[in-house]
């Protein structure tokens, strides 16, 4: 984790070219809901999980930051025993053995972060950017296992509120990450440190 944070800090420093005191690094706790496209009928579907985001940013001006991030979205799962059913895009499928299907994803992103100072300590912000994501789909049953990896680049956007005290800032927000037409919605809460 220290290595990832160091990489984000170096990337932010080299990308923004601003004064050192305008840089920040932080970590967010994420509560994610992963849209798998699956409708549960009689199996066990869990599309919610926790994750984290490591980020670094720099101030372009009073109203705009640029932020880079690494995001771990956690995992969604579908499990069942023989006879359990689920559907995808209107087609119904049935487990013929006890099995678990999992989907997990991570991404690296860069975003423009417009901000509005409410007062000296409180700030409203938005985010819009691109993220390069990697996902893994895995199947595990009593008789076999298999996995499939996918990746792509899509948009993400969100908004939140930040409260700062000296060099520490706490923030809460909501973001939506597109993964090739499927969304990960994320509620975040975290802390950052400004240099």
Image (cartoon, grey):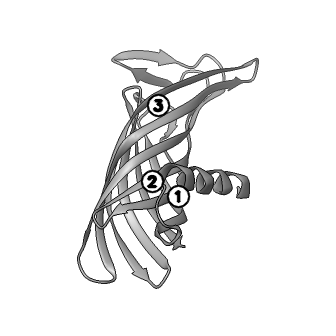
Q: Nearer the viewer, residue 71 or 50?
A: 71
Residue bearing the label numbered 1: 56
Q: Is residue 77 above or below residue 21?
A: above
Residue for point 48% across, 43% down: 109
Q: Viewed as shown, does residue 91 lie left or right of 12?
A: left
Q: Is residue 84 left or right of residue 5?
A: left
> CA separation, marks 2 and 1?
6 Å
Task: From the viewer's side, name the closer residue of 182 and 123.
Answer: 123
Residue 125 percent location from the top left of the image: 30, 62
Count the marks: how many? Answer: 3
Mark 3: secondary structure:
loop
Q: Secondary structure at mark 2?
A: strand
* Callout 1 secondary element: strand
Q: Earlier in the sequence, mark 2 or mark 1?
A: 1
- Residue marked by disc 2: 67
Q: Nearer the viewer, mark 2 or mark 3?
A: 2
| Residue holding disc 3 | 42
Please name whichever residue, 64 or 87, is drawn nearer the observer in this view of the structure.
64
**Image-quadrant location for residue 58:** bottom left
> CB of mark 2 within 8 Å of CB of mark 1?
yes
Name the residue at 53% across, 56% down.
55
Within-10-Å neighbours for mark 1: few <14, some 14–19, many 20+ = many
Residue lying at 35% horizontally and 18% vertically, measured from the top left: 89
Residue at x-position 70% and y-position 55%? 1
In the image shown, does 145 or 150 lie closer to the viewer?
Answer: 150
Upstream in sequence: badge 1 or badge 3: 3
Q: CA distance from mark 2 to mark 3?
A: 42 Å
Instruction: Tell me the crowding category of disc 2: few under 14, some 14 to 19, or many 20 or more residues within 10 angstroms, Cα based.
Output: many
Tag shown at residue 92: none
The answer to whether one can see residue 14 in this image is yes
């Amino acid at each position: 984790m220290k290595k990832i944070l160091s990489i984000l800090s170096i990337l932010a420093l080299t990308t923004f070219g601003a004064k050192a005191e305008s840089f920040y690094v932080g970590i967010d706790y994420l509560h994610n809901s992963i849209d798998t496209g699956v409708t549960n009928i009689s199996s066990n579907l869990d599309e919610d999980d926790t994750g984290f985001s490591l980020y670094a940013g720099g101030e372009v001006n009073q109203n705009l930051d640029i932020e880079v991030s690494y995001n771990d979205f956690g995992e969604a799962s579908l499990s069942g025993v023989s006879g359990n059913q689920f559907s995808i895009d209107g087609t119904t499928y049935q487990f013929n053995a006890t099995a678990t299907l999992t989907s997990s994803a991570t991404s690296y992103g860069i975003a423009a972060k417009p901000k509005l100072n409410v007062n000296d300590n409180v700030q409203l912000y938005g985010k819009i950017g691109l993220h390069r994501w990697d996902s893994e789909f895995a199947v595990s049953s009593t008789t076999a296992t298999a996995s499939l990896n996918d990746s792509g680049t899509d948009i993400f956007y969100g908004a939140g509120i930040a409260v700062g005290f000296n060099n520490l800032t706490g923030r809460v927000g909501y973001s939506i990450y597109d993964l090739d037409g499927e969304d990960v919605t994320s509620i975040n809460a975290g802390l950052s440190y400004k240099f």
